[in-house]
Image (cartoon, grey):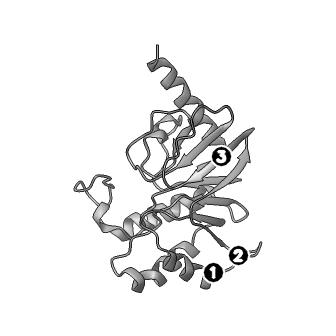
Amino acid sequence: MKFFTADTHYFHADLLGDNDFAPRPFRTVTEMNEVMVTNWNRVVKDNDVVYNLGDIAMHPKYEAGYPEILALLTRLNGQIHFVKGNHDSRAFFKYLAAHDPGHSKGKKFFFHDVGVIIKFDHHQYYLTHYPVLLGITKNIRNIHGHIHYSSIPIKENLNVGVDAPELSYLPEKQPFGMPISENQIGIIAAAKAAELAKLRH
């Protein structure tokens, strides 16, 4: 099974409380991290693949915090593909690659500077950190993050960030930090397309 997430911002204390453009309802970074790890592992199994579309973590100790970030990421089930976000550095990716904990299928971590193209459910998906405007397309969609509480008013653009408004299209509330499955992508895409169609009439 494939899963998708973005803007996890592990260790990012500035997002706690009400004082940021993307506030999170946690008192401490430890509480936030633990809830997100638990919710990830509730649905992702070890043979699954997760695409984290950037802004993975922001540790207050910068490079000195890499070992703590690695320890957290190692606890997450599945193989993980990281797409570089604006808060991620090549140095961070190099550190993770050099300390890959391994997986039953080989490597645990994979890295992409710009994005990935995959196919499922009769669609081609551009997986990027930033939203990509694809123009008029039939079977191409963009799964992205970066814009947190905002949404692109185009049906082909699907924000899968942990705090994305597109999560409201799901029939049940998505626990914070739980990646979105490929099946849920179809539900979100259909619901967003229907809502935008209503707004045009």
* Amino acid at pointer 1: Asp
Q: Are marks 3 and 2 in contact (CB under 8 Å)?
A: no
Residue under label 3: 125
Residue drawn at (46%, 37%) of the image: 168
Q: Is residue 99 visible?
A: no
Please identify the quarter of the rendering in which residue 86 is found: bottom left
Residue 98, horizontal then vertical, whole percent:
61, 85
Residue 60 vs residue 86, the one in the foreground: 86
Residue under label 1: 100
Cα distance between the residues tagged 2 and 1: 7 Å
Above-or-below relation of 132 to 110: above
Circle 1 residues within 10 Å: few <14, some 14–19, many ≥20: some
Element type at marker 3?
Answer: strand
Query: How many marks overall?
Result: 3
- Outermost residue on the left side: it is 19
Residue drawn at (64%, 37%) of the image: 186
Disc ID at residue 107:
2
Above-or-below relation of 25 to 67: above
The mark that comes first in sequence, 2 or 1, is 1
Residue drawn at (58%, 75%) of the image: 74
Cα distance between the residues tagged 3 and 2: 23 Å
The mark that comes first in sequence, 3 or 2, is 2
User: From the viewer's perspective, is 119 left or right of 172?
Assistant: right
Residue 11, horizontal then vertical, whole percent:
38, 70
Residue 19, horizontal then vertical, whole percent:
22, 56
Which of discs 3 and 2 lies nearer the camera? The answer is 3
